[in-house]
Image: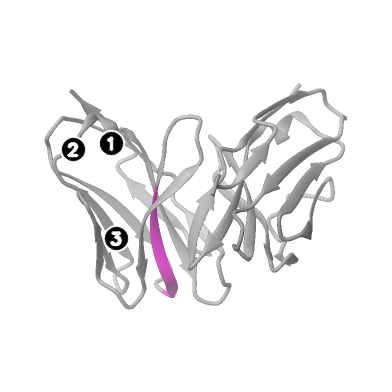
């Protein structure tokens, strides 16, 4: 298996633009997580899905953020409109037997 | 609210040295604890997972211990190598919320040849 696949690897956008991050979890994993990592706040859980259903979205910073998982092999995290303070590395992870497997992340820069 | 602290924040050692990384957590009601490794520009790789009922787990040169009652875990790395250089993070999983992990800030390890 290729592991958790995220795209794009890097995204540079201007304030106010819509940003969509994509994730393909490992096949057979039934939980999917979106994390954000910054120097100031470390790793923060934004939202997680179990069997494609959002279970806990309390980490989503505000209404500008939304996440979907239309099927077991695909998830998106959307930021609309984006702001400079959203600049961070966004990780997707999927889990099996309580172990998390992370993607390589999307480095987002909002100018 | 669960808080996870890792000490030291950074560590530099010569190759071959045995070393210990520390992790402490404020709420002992955990389901499990995981140690991860993160290389620069990469995602996290799970190294060891310890269930709350276990005392330790071993994988190769790595040994992780857990003292749930005192809220502490250690990651022991034997005979360190330059390839071990990375940031090591511990994360605790709360009992009542499935797979919601709380991460520490990490220890940045440098092993010098």
Res. B80 mark = 2
Residue occupying image coordinates x 43% and y 75%: B29
Within 10 angstroms of label 2, few (less than 14), some, or many (20 or more) residues?
many
The quadrant where residue A106 appears: top right
Query: Which residue is at 59% across, 62% downward?
Result: A29
In the image, which is nearer the foreground, mark 1 or mark 3?
1
- Name the residue at 15% across, 46% down: B78
Q: Is residue A28 magenta?
A: no
Start-end of magenta stretch = B29-36
Report the predominant secondary structure element of the magenta stretch: strand
Q: In screen coordinates, is A13 left or right of A42?
A: right
Q: Is residue A46 above or below residue B107?
A: below
Q: Position of residue A62 (x, y in %)?
A: 79, 50
2 and 1 marks on the same chain: yes
What residue would you read off at disc 1?
A: B84
Which residue is at 29% across, 42% downward? B8
Real-space Cα distance between discs 2 and 1?
7 Å
Residue A60, percent across and down?
73, 53
Helix, strand or loop at label 1? It is helix
Distance from the alpha carbon under mark 2 to that under mark 3: 19 Å
Q: Nearer the viewer, residue B105 or B58?
A: B58
Q: Is residue A59 left or right of residue B28?
A: right
Q: With respect to residue A17, does B91 lie above or below?
A: below
- The image quarter in which residue B81 lies: top left
Nearer the observer: mark 2 or 3; the answer is 2
Labels 2 & 1 near each other (Cβ < 8 A) = yes
User: Could you tell me which secondary element the residue under label 3 belongs to?
Assistant: strand
Quadrant where the C terminus of chain B is found in the figure? top left
């Amino acid at each position: 298996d290729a592991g958790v696949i995220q795209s794009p690897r890097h995204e540079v956008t201007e304030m106010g633009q819509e940003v969509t991050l994509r994730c393909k979890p490992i096949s057979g994993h039934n939980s999917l997580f979106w994390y954000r990592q910054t120097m100031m706040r470390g790793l923060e859980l934004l939202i997680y899905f179990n069997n494609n259903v959002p279970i806990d979205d309390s980490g989503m910073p505000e209404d500008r953020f939304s996440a979907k998982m239309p099927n077991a092999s695909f998830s998106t995290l959307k930021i609309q409109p984006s702001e400079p303070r959203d600049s961070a590395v966004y990780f997707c992870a999927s889990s099996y037997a309580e172990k998390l497997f992370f993607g390589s992340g999307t480095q987002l820069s909002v100018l | 609210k669960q808080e996870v602290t890792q000490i030291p924040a950074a560590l530099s050692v010569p190759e071959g040295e045995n070393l210990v990384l520390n992790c402490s957590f404020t709420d002992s009601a955990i389901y499990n604890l995981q140690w991860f490794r993160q290389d620069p520009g990469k995602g996290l790789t799970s190294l060891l997972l310890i269930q709350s009922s276990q005392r330790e787990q071993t994988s190769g040169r790595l040994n992780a211990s857990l003292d749930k009652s005192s809220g502490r875990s250690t990651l022991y790395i034997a005979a360190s190598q330059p390839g071990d250089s990375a940031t090591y993070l511990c994360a605790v999983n709360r009992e009542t919320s499935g797979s919601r992990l709380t991460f520490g800030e990490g220890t940045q390890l440098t092993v010098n040849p």
